Image: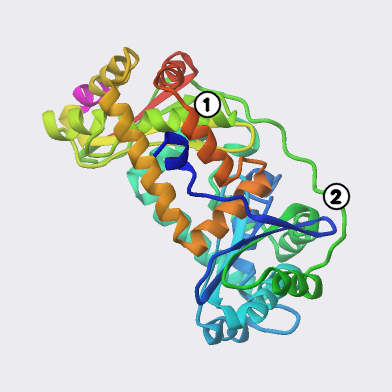
Amino acid sequence: MREAELFAVEREPRTLGHGRLTVLHDPLPGPLTAIAVAIRAGSRFDGRSPGIAHMTEHMLFQGTTSMDQVALNRRAGELGGEHDADTGHEDMTLHIEVFNDDFEDALALLAEQLFRSTVPEDGFAKERRVVIDEIRGRQEDPANALHEAAWRRFFGGPLAHPICGTIQSLRRMTPGCVRQFLRRHFTPANMVVAVVGGTSRERVRRAVRRLFPAHGPPRPRPPARPGHGTTGFLRFHRRDLAQTYLVRLAAAPSDPRTVLALSLAVEIVGADPDARLFQEIRERLGLGYDLGASVEHGSDWAVLVVSASAARDHERRLRTTIERTCADAAQGFSPDEFDRARAKVRYRFARLADSRLERALAHAGRAVCGHPSLAASARILATLERAEVETAWRGTLAAPTLTAIMSG
């Protein structure tokens, strides 16, 4: 089988016209249908209220014009499917997976949340307390606290603050702010609906026409492109820490081909058991347990993130090992390493082909943010050569980089 065929496990979903609303249908035989709605309204769009997108996500489950919080959640339970939401830097997603026979009712429930949420005062006060507790919990975790501190220093503008916001910004927030956010961002032009499963195309078309508005204001203007602030080295102290925590952020080009090439490089250098950092830090030196490596990206930004921890006395060894291993990788990758990285990515695409919900979320999120589709990404991956992946890795070594350390 040719390499292109090995990656070509995805087909393009069919786009169904409905005014300014984008609807994607990906038929997959079987008894279940997954629905994902992505809204271009992640934390980058918080404006003067850090955390408002995440708070809005919470309020989608607190009551609508025809259902209170109890009725809404009972209705989701009656449908028997997975019903949840998530907020990222770029977008927010609302999803549900149900039996094919319940498709229209499930889509009606999502439309009710998206267009008729009321943001009740009592529900807002309760959820604000919940989110503040969530923020406190994240602050108590040294690894997460360091990541957020480094991220805030590395990025400027609307990308810098945590997705949840801060305790101070949450306390300043009001239900009226959330209602205004809903009116501004929850419009057909700012949404993508993706349907994956056994429901027919005509049934999807009829239900969307009945339940979702086709027209409305244009998509809100995107925020300014994020810049880079602090680079070099930062140190943070926290009393009574027995461990040292490290986060390394390196800027990367945001074009899809380079992001995918860098992602393949991370498979070789990163935190999997066969990867170089894991082998050096965990297996050869036994420095620490927690190790992570990933590429995070949006419509106009990308960053390589490496994180690790070790005993406090091993801080210098941890830092120098990461720097040396990353620099050594710039000398090139072996054919065996490259083949293993491609095999791992092929496996992930193959798994995605069998998951209705993950496919729906991927279709909707990629489309609303202007990223290549799953099929287009597979085609790019199939044509990447080892030299191109090596070049992408070398580029991170010359890019603006911030290394942050937290210790006792």
Question: Above or below — where is 359 with respect to 7?
Answer: below
x then y, percent, for residue 361: 56, 57
Amino acid under disc 1: Thr
93 above or below 10?
A: below
- Label 2 sits on a secondary structure element that is loop
**Above/below status of 155 relative to 348:** above
| Count of labels in the image | 2
> Where residue 84 sits: x, y (%)?
53, 68
Q: Nearer the viewer, residue 135 or 274?
A: 274
Q: Residues within 10 Å of mark 2 (few under 14, many from 20)?
A: few
Residue 245 disc label:
none
* Residue 154 visible in the displayed image: no
Magenta-drawn segment: 315-319
For label 1, the residue is 258
- Identify residue type, mark 2: Pro
- Residue at screen point 64% across, 38% down: 158
In percent of width and height, residue 337 lies at 28, 28
In the shown orientation, is residue 42 left or right of residue 266?
right
Q: CA distance from mark 2 to mark 1?
A: 30 Å
Is 143 magenta? The answer is no
Q: Which residue is mark 2?
A: 218
Camera sees residue 349: yes
- Find residue 204 and report its horizontal and vertical position in percent: 70, 70
Other residues around mark 1 within 10 Å, as few (<14) / some (14–19) / many (≥20): many
Left-right relation of 65 to 295: right
Q: Is residue 155 above or below residue 124?
A: above
Secondary structure, magenta segment, majority class? helix
Q: Residue at x 80, y 46 (%)?
A: 220
Viewer-closest of 390 and 198 = 198
